[in-house]
Amino acid sequence: MVELRTPEDTLDFGRRLGALLTAGDLVLLAGPLGAGKTVLAKGIADGLGVRGRVSSPTFIIAREHPAGERGVPMVHVDAYRLGGDLAQLDDLDLDTELVDAAVVVEWGEGAAERLSADHLLIRIARRPDDTRELTLEPSGSWETRLTALTANHA
C-alpha cells in the first residue's frame, strides 16, 4: 500500500508513474467519488509530458491529450457514465488507442481490464484525515515494473 498525505503527494506519485508509461500501457483508477482519481490522472499526464489541460472527462467520456517531447499521447477515459456497458466501452475503440498511446481509465474496473493483459489497477481509498491509500494491483509486465514506482512510498 502507498500512502499519499496531500494532493501534491498524489500529483507527485502520478508524475512518477507517468514517467514510466509508454505507448500501449493501460492504467485503471478505481475509487469512490472524491478519492483523487482525476488528481492522479493529472500527475500521470504531467509525468508523460502531454499537452492540454487535464480534467475529468465525465461528460465527453474520453479525451486525447497530444504527445509532448516524450512522444507518447495519453487517452484519459471516465467510464462512470457507461455503467459497465461493455458495448459503449468497445465503441471508444480503446484497443486501437493502446497501440499508440498510454490509456488511463477512471471507473474502468470490471470492464476495461479486458483491453490488455498488461495493466495496472490502482485502487484509491480516502481516509477521514484526507490521506489517500493506494493499493496497486499489477497484471502482466506490471508485476516487475512496480519496483521503480513504489520505491520510497511503501
Image: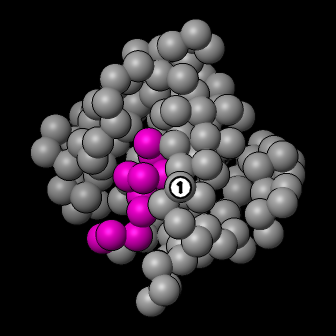
Q: Residue at (62%, 14%) from the top-left corner?
A: 70
Q: Secondary structure at mark 1?
A: helix
Q: Is residue 62 above or below residue 86?
A: above
* Residue 53 locus on image (x, y percent): 32, 30
Q: Which residues are magenta?
A: 33-42
Check if residue 38 falls in the magenta segment: yes
Q: Which amino acid, by three-letter code, is at mark 1?
A: Glu
The quarter of the picture where the N terminus appears is bottom right
Q: For this view, does 32 lie left or right of residue 6?
A: left
Q: For this view, does 115 lie left or right of residue 135?
A: left
Q: Which residue is mark 1?
A: 8
* Residue 133 locus on image (x, y percent): 59, 75
The quarter of the displayed image where residue 16 is located: top right
The quarter of the displayed image where residue 24 is located: top right
* Residue 7 locus on image (x, y percent): 48, 60
Residue nearest the viewer, comparing 83 with 49: 49
Residue nearest the viewer, comparing 140 with 130: 130
- The chief SS type of the magenta part is helix
Q: Residue at (42%, 53%) from the top-left corner?
A: 39
Check if residue 154 falls in the magenta segment: no
Question: Can the viewer see residue 93 in this picture?
Answer: no
Residue nearest the viewer, comparing 45 with 7: 7
Q: Is residue 115 above or below residue 70?
A: below
Q: Residue at (77%, 63%) from the top-left corner?
A: 153
